[in-house]
Amino acid sequence: MAQRGHSAYIPCVAAPIQHQDRKPAWLKVKAPGGENYTHLKKTLRKLDLYTVCEEARCPNVGECWSAGTATVMLLGHTCTRGCRFCAVTTGNPRGAVDPREPEHVAKAIAQLGLKYVVLTMVDRDDLLDGGAAHMSKAVQNLHAAQPGLLVETLVGDFGGRKRDIAVMVDSAPDVFAHNIEVTRRLTPLIRDRRCSYDLSLEVLRYAKERAPERFVKSSIMVGMGEEDDEVVETLRDLRAANVDIVTLGQYLRPTPKHAPVHRFVTPEQFEEYARIGRELGFKFVASGPLVRSSYHAAEGFVAAQLRPESQLAGGGDSAYQHLQAGSSEAVREAAEPPLVPLTALVRSR
């Protein structure tokens, strides 16, 4: 999952791009708006959900909200890890957890009337189980409150403890996701020192072993100094760990204090990643400049497999078929505007 950041110097393979405003045309997005966007924004306010993507001025918020999908972040707003790509606060929450949060989230999501929700989390190394029981309870409450809802969990590595990973898997999310984030060589440079490339692979492998019937998903950021052959190596490693779904997207620097962007990967190169991923045998590959770990087309693919009658399945299935078509035009069209779901933080009541 996305761990949280402080600044660091990253040795350059090529001269780093210093300014985020020098983005190529394919990274431009439309201003948010529309009836669905406005309705969801008002509803989120009433439910006392604080949106990180608004505060961070995320360029994807318009399409995300208009699509009616949501990613809800649990276990507070302070992460115990400090990765160099993410701006969420790093610190020590000292065991603080809102026990009402799983119930509150379930009630709020039920009122939103969503078809698909992603539950993500900050890393909580200060908790004995890393927050697994808390996340598990939230999944169970969501299933009870809204039986037809598709639930994806995007979680940390829980220190590699199988008992905690099992608690999470056994709560029966429709998709178990954990992000490897970057290539093997960049892992010690970009991710927190407590993160491990091989440990992430083991988490994904064990989740699939424990529940072979469920989708397992991961994500790769590019443009951070990796070579294309390293991306292919990571794709091979993920597939060897029995990952079903993979997403690849462009890293964008949150602030000047974070790791610099080394390159803007072209839509054509993202198309090539997708082609290789399909050849490796992934059930679904979403690859494009504005693709993120929670991506509407990937969610549509899952919905098409598990809830073929749903509206999300119809729209998402079309989107994923378009992405899978394999043309650079398809990749550009899928990436503009982006289809990346909202991230929300639940306030304690």
Image (spheres, grey):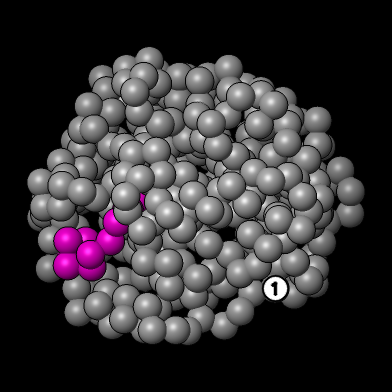
Residues rendered magenta in the picture: 108-120
Measured along the vertical axis of the image, is residue 179 above or below residue 94?
above
**Is residue 110 magenta-colored?**
yes
Q: Position of residue 268 (x, y in %)?
A: 81, 50
Q: Residue furthest front?
A: 309
| Category of crowding for the residue at label 1, using alpha-carbon neighbours closer than 10 angstroms: few (below 14), some (14–19), many (at least 20) | some
User: With 145 as the anchor, is 6 left or right in this view?
Assistant: right
Q: Position of residue 127 (x, y in %)?
A: 25, 37
Quarter residue 182 falls in: top right
Quarter residue 130 falls in: top left
Foreground residue among 158 and 61: 61
User: With 87 as the anchor, is 126 left or right in this view?
Assistant: left
| Residue depicted at 53% across the width and 19% down the height | 241
**Is residue 128 magenta-colored?**
no
Foreground residue among 202 and 316: 316
Measured along the vertical axis of the image, is residue 169 above or below residue 50?
above
User: With 141 as the anchor, is 149 left or right in this view?
Assistant: right
Q: Position of residue 114 (x, y in %)?
A: 28, 61
User: With 274 as the anchor, is 202 left or right in this view?
Assistant: left
| Residue depicted at 38% across the width and 84% down the height | 35
Q: Is residue 67 visible?
A: yes
Mark 1 falls on what kind of element? loop
Amino acid type, mark 1 = Lys
Q: Position of residue 1 (x, y in %)?
A: 46, 42
Measured along the vertical axis of the image, is residue 110 above or below residue 286?
below
Q: Which residue is mark 1?
A: 28
- The C terminus is located in which quarter? bottom left
